[in-house]
Amino acid sequence: MPGFSQNVYAFILDTTQYKERPNIPGQPAGKIGDIQSDQLEIIKELVEREKEGSTIILMGHHPFKQLKKGAQDEIDLLITQHKIPVYISAHTHKGRYFSNGNSEKWLELNVGSITDWPIEFRNFSLCEIADTPEKLLICSKLYRIPEFWDEEPKYKKLTDIKKEDWNADNKENYRFLSRD
């Protein structure tokens, strides 16, 4: 990232890696996420290899609380051991921050959706704070098209939307994180 003194790596987890094939009514596909040991071992190796002088972000489709308990424990351990500042998720399209963790609390950013109501998305950036190098600033502005699916929509298709028609929600845009 420009002006950032460290390399930033984002590792994307496949949170649909199930040990047994999901079925209805037992385990509906997609409702609860899972991660198996083979994927976790690869992620652990990558994190260990890149941790010195780097900032690492984890991403996965399912929110932390919608993962199976074993996957939650492994991700929590990985995040707390390696001081990973944020886990970015989707699935619920809540578009907000959550605090997670067993022994130590850490941050999750759940992003919105451009296919479900409300139509929204976020940009995401990490910034170092010059006077306080042990802290990071997460900037993640939320954008919404509030009336896109109204009864008489102003827009007939997504390409009709102009940049100035997007609303920016200033709530929850910034979070300070400690690196230590």
Image (tube, rainbow, N blue to C red):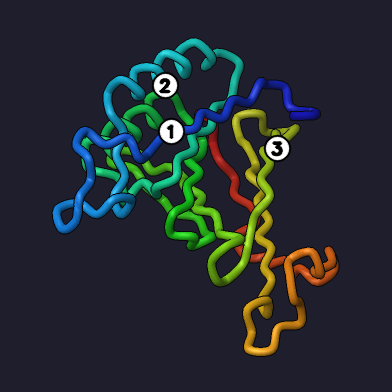
In the rendering, at what x and y percent does residue 44 appear? Answer: 39, 18
13 with respect to 54 (left or right): left
Mark 3 or mark 2: whose residue is earlier in sequence? 2
Q: Residue at x 60, y 15 (%)?
A: 53
Say which amino acid is labelled 1.
Leu
In the rendering, at what x and y percent does residue 90 appear? Answer: 48, 51
Residue 48 sits above or below residue 134 on the image: above
Q: Residue at x 39, y 17 (%)?
A: 42
Identify which residue, 23 or 106, lies in the foreground: 23
Q: Quadrant of residue 104?
A: top left
22 with respect to 114 (left or right): left
Residue holding disc 3: 127
Residue holding disc 2: 43
159 with respect to 142 (left or right): right
Q: Residue at x 51, y 36 (%)?
A: 85
Mark 3 vs mark 2: in front? 2
Mark 1 or mark 2: whose residue is earlier in sequence? 1
Residue 49 sits above or below residue 130 on the image: above
Q: Secondary structure at mark 2?
A: helix
Q: Quadrant of residue 148?
A: bottom right
Q: Secondary structure at mark 1?
A: strand
Residue 32 sits above or below residue 84 on the image: below
Report how far apart the C-alphas of labels 1 and 3 lie in the structure: 23 Å
Q: Quadrant of residue 142?
A: bottom right
Q: Quadrant of the N terminus?
A: top right
Task: Specify few, some or many for label 3: CA neighbours under 10 Å numbering under 14, 14-19, or 20 or more.
Answer: some
Q: Secondary structure at mark 3?
A: strand
In the rendering, at what x and y percent does residue 125 appear? Answer: 68, 41
Say which amino acid is labelled 3.
Cys
Residue 44 sits above or below residue 84 on the image: above
- Do the residues bearing badges 1 and 2 touch, measured as CB atoms within 8 Å? yes
Residue holding disc 1: 13
